Amino acid sequence: MLCTIDITETRKAQEELQQTRNFLQSMINNLPVAVFVKDAKPESFGTFKLWNHTYENIFGITAEQAIGKTDYEFFPK
C-alpha cells in the first residue's frame, strides 16, 4: 500500500515563517536603540534570548556571547 502526502502548503508556510523571522531579526539588529529579550521560563529564568547590534556596541559583548547567559555572568552582584 502506497501512501502519499502533499507537503507543499506546509513547506510554503515554513518558508514564509523563516522569511518573517529573518526580516524581524534584521529590523531589531538595525534599531538605533539597545534591545534584548530574556527568558521567563522557571528553568531558564533571566537568560538572554535576543541581543541586538546596538547592545553589542554598548557593552562590547556579542549576541553569541550573551545568548543563554544571565546578567550575573557579565555583571557580578
Image: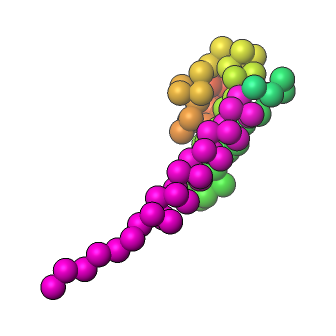
Judge left or right: residue 59 versus residue 4: right
Q: Look at the image and give the residue range highlighted in magenta.
A: 1-29
Q: Is any atom of residue 74 visible in this view?
A: yes
Count of all numbered marks drawn on residues in the image = 0
For residue 35, above or below residue 60: below
Q: Residue furthest bottom?
A: 1
For residue 15, above or below residue 59: below
Q: Residue at x 75, y 16 (%)?
A: 58
Q: Residue at x 59, y 27 (%)?
A: 63
Q: Is any atom of residue 45 visible in this view?
A: no
Question: In the depicted view, which residue is nearer to us: 53 or 8?
Answer: 8
Q: Residue at x 80, y 28 (%)?
A: 31
Quadrant assignment, res 2: bottom left
Q: Residue furthest left?
A: 1
Q: Residue at x 63, y 32 (%)?
A: 72
Q: Give how far across and how far down residue 3 sits, in percent.
A: 25, 80
Does residue 22 show up magenta in the picture? yes
Q: Give how far across and how far down residue 48 sits, in percent.
A: 62, 39
Judge left or right: residue 2 versus residue 47: left
- The quadrant of the rendering that contains the N terminus is bottom left
Q: Main secondary structure of the magenta part?
A: helix
Does residue 68 show up magenta in the picture? no
Question: In the depicted view, which residue is nearer to us: 67 or 21?
Answer: 21
Q: Give how far across and how far down residue 44 sits, in percent.
A: 56, 51
- The quadrant of the rendering that contains the C terminus is top right
Quadrant assignment, res 30: top right
Q: How was the colour assigned to the protein in this rendering?
A: rainbow
